[in-house]
Amino acid sequence: MSDKKIDLDDRLQILCKMYEQKIPFNKVLGLKIESLNIEDVRVKFEMKETFVGNYVHGILHGGVISAVLDTTGGLTASLGVLQNMKRRTAEEIGKSLAKIGTIDLRIDYLRPGKGKYFIATGSIMRAGRRVSVTRMELYNDQDVLITVGTGTYIVG
């Protein structure tokens, strides 16, 4: 990678590419980042037969929900890291983002996961130098809130 310093839009593109194309499990889930900026994180995925947890009712498996919300929380926590990475190279940014990991995850399942597709959103509750806390929500294609969660992530 080059020593060229990159602006926020370029940093967001690095993050988007990392989460959509570089993380194999995210590709299995078919995650697509619909919106990624400091105020708004939106991740979409389509319902698949392999995601069904209750075959009688065709309901989304809780593990899929948890994985998507954890990914969304990590993506959201990454935004806090990017904000503090002004005047850094792409290589430095990549190394910092690779250190992010989940410390704690709480998921509250509110309704059955029925839908053709789902949208996960994330927001930063606290962005510290070492730890960030995020809030995540999952909506179905009818804009019904299915699940909420909070995640704590090591970021430094």
Image (cartoon, rainbow, N blue to C red):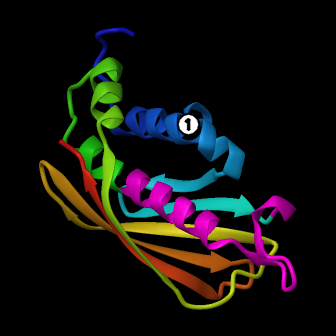
Q: Is residue 57 left or right of residue 133?
A: right
The residue closer to the viewer here, 108 or 72, is 108
Percent x, y for residue 146?
Answer: 60, 84
The residue closer to the viewer here, 75 or 103, is 103
The residue depicted at 73 percent of the width and 85 percent of the height is 142
Residue at numbered disc 1? 23
Percent x, y for residue 125?
Answer: 25, 70
| Quadrant where the image shows the N terminus | top left
Q: Is residue 95 magenta?
A: no
Q: Is residue 120 left or right of residue 11?
A: right
Q: Is residue 61 magenta?
A: yes
Quadrant of the rendered image containing residue 139: bottom right
Residue density around tag 1, few if under 14, some if 14–19, many if 20 or more, within 10 Å: few
| Quadrant where the image shows the C terminus | top left
The residue depicted at 79 percent of the width and 66 percent of the height is 47
Circle 1: element type: loop
- Please give the range of residues in magenta: 48-76
Quadrant of the rendered image containing residue 109: bottom right
Up-down: is 60 above or below 74? Answer: below
The residue depicted at 61 percent of the width and 43 percent of the height is 25
Percent x, y for residue 37?
Answer: 42, 54
Up-down: is 53 above or below 100? Answer: below
The residue depicted at 50 percent of the width and 35 percent of the height is 18
Quadrant of the rendered image containing residue 24: top right
Amino acid type assigned to the residue bearing label 1 in the image: Ile
The residue closer to the viewer here, 71 or 127, is 71
Percent x, y for residue 49?
Answer: 86, 63
Residue closest to the far left? 129
Up-down: is 133 above or below 93? Answer: below
Q: Main secondary structure of the magenta part?
A: helix
The residue closer to the viewer here, 120 or 154, is 154
